[in-house]
Image: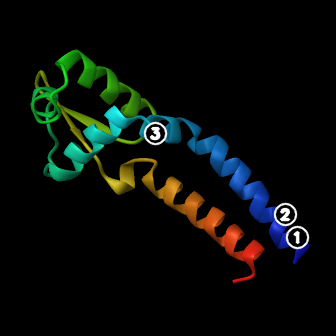
Amino acid sequence: MEKDCKQRLEEITQGFQECRKAFTAIGDETRQLILLVLLQSDLDGIRVGEIAAKTHLTRPSVSHHLQILKEAGIINMRKEGTKNYYYIRADETQWKKLADLMKLVYEGIIHIDGV
């Protein structure tokens, strides 16, 4: 029993380290707003100008936040000629790791609570 708990804590610690940039990226309210716009767009992606119009942010601000999200593995970008399209896909981003980590944390809490 003790070994399972220790292993779970090690996995959670490693998960926090691996997902630190992603947590920081999604913790910002502006980036959350951008993520909501991306979640409402189609799978082909959306351009900076469209995101700026929907969020009432400037294009430079949107570009800055998109870069942070992209570097953190939260979103992806594809080029089509000179145009960049931003999108979210579960299989190409950190979302699975984040979900798995949250599941581990939740299981640890349940274990402590004895539920």
Q: In the image, residue 20 lies at what x, y percent?
A: 58, 39
Which image quadrant is residue 25 in? top left
Tags 1 and 2 in contact by the CB under 8 Å rule?
A: yes
Q: In 3D space, how far apart are the residues under numbered discs 3 and 2 (Cα atoms)?
A: 28 Å
Q: Position of residue 19 (x, y in %)?
A: 57, 44
How far across and down, in percent of the image, does residue 79 sit? Answer: 19, 30
| Residue 43 seen in this snapshot | no
Mark 2 element type: helix
The type of residue carrying mark 1 is Lys
Of the two numbered discs 1 and 3 on the same chain, state the one appearing first in sequence.
1
Which amino acid lies under the numbered mark 3 shown in the image of this protein? Gly
Residue at label 1?
Answer: 3
Disc 3 crowd, CA 10 A, few/some/many (<14, 14-19, 20+): few
Amino acid at pointer 2: Lys
State whether residue 27 is above or below residue 15: above
Left or right of 115, for residue 93: left
Tell me where residue 55 appears, x and y as whole percent: 17, 34
